[in-house]
Image: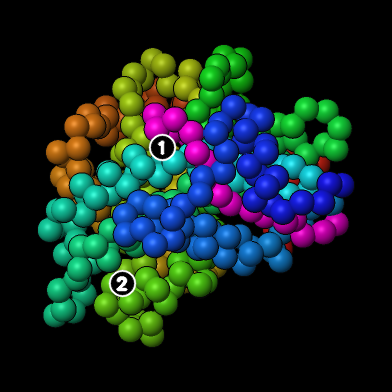
Amino acid sequence: MAIGKPEDMFHRVVREEGYWGRYEASESDNGLDGFISDAYRLMNGSFTAQQPKLVTDGGHPDLYFAAIEADDNDVNALAFIEDGWAMVGITKGLFDSLYSFFAIACQDHDLVRSFESGASTLDASEIFALLYITAINFAANHELGHLVHGHCSSAATGPRTVRRERLLQADAACRLRSQAAEVEADGYATHMTLQNLLNGPARDAAARQLGVPPDDPQLDEELLRVFLTAVICFFHRLQDAFAAKDVELRSHPFELLRINVVIANLRGWCSTHRPQLANWPNQDDFARIGGMVRNAVSSSGIEDAWDAQTAFLGSDAGQQYRDRLYHESELLRKQMEPLQWRVL
Ligand SMILES: [Zn+2]
């Protein structure tokens, strides 16, 4: 096994994969670079907290997160295993596009005010920081989820498998299988992002940003709203044209279905860790948050497809597609069993 620093290994692999290298963020920067620098610290901290709970090949995997320097238009995230290290990267382009998008969302007073629980007025920049870093956390944990579920080869010999969210060429024969893998990764990301935000190191910082004491009984529900708002914004930004007839030709399930998967997993996490919130959100909560986000980002220039996706999901064809996808997820999970990591 090669001995090297993870940052050097990450830099080498992403260069071999055609990127410019590991992104060096300036810590003293007040804008995007400062957030990327925070993301290095926060994500690697969250990965360190997850490591003792993950078992692969009889040991705990070494985990590493970094940003990737690439063309500004290259909006991507990826996961791979190299020399025993499980590594996750997010391109500078993805950091950048979410940064602009969340900045637009947080110019909306209703969205910022929705997190006000007391008399105090919230600072929009604090809400921006909280939502943006929560979305980055979700994206990074999604990539780690691919590794945990065995979607990347970890064989000592043979070519390295790098799982990219945006593929150069999608394999038409495997698209429902690819969508099933995305469902699995979203499930993992939901559990781990909530664990970090409600039970982990992110909780106290989030409470400060929300202006709520850490022991306030309302804080848990407030944090769930932070998570869901961040995830809905994230999926809004990812949207592209939606056509019901092409639903199985995509590499990822359409965004409303992914949000449904996230909510099912959120309730699953709550039923274990916060039983009193196991039914959150109800239909009204979800509609309110979804409508608020949609309104807040209406000036972003992104034409959303929520109406078409809602209509499709409510149709017979939509239900049948969803059933096929969930069935495929079960098959995939069984097939991947030998490669999956154990989650303690
Ligand atoms: Zn994915």
- Stretch of the chain drawn in magenta: 58-76
**Which mark, residue 277?**
none
Q: Residue at x 55, y 33 (%)?
A: 20
How packed mark 1 is, by other alpha carbons closer than 10 Å (few <14, some 14-19, many 20 or more), is many
Badge 2 element: helix
Q: Residue at x 79, y 45 (%)?
A: 83
Which amino acid type is shown beneath numbered disc 1?
Gly
Tag 2 residue = 209
Give the camera-side residue of 176 and 234. 234
Side of 48 relative to 96 (left or right): right
Tag 1 residue = 93
Magenta span includes 316:
no
Vertically, is 224 above or below 302?
Answer: below
Q: Earlier in the sequence, mark 1 or mark 2?
A: 1
Quadrant of image for the C terminus: bottom right
State the scheme by which the image is colored: rainbow
How packed mark 2 is, by other alpha carbons closer than 10 Å (few <14, some 14-19, many 20 or more), is some
Question: Residue 132: image x %, image y %?
Answer: 35, 54
Using the rendered image of the protein, determine whether residue 139 is visible from the camera's viewpoint: yes
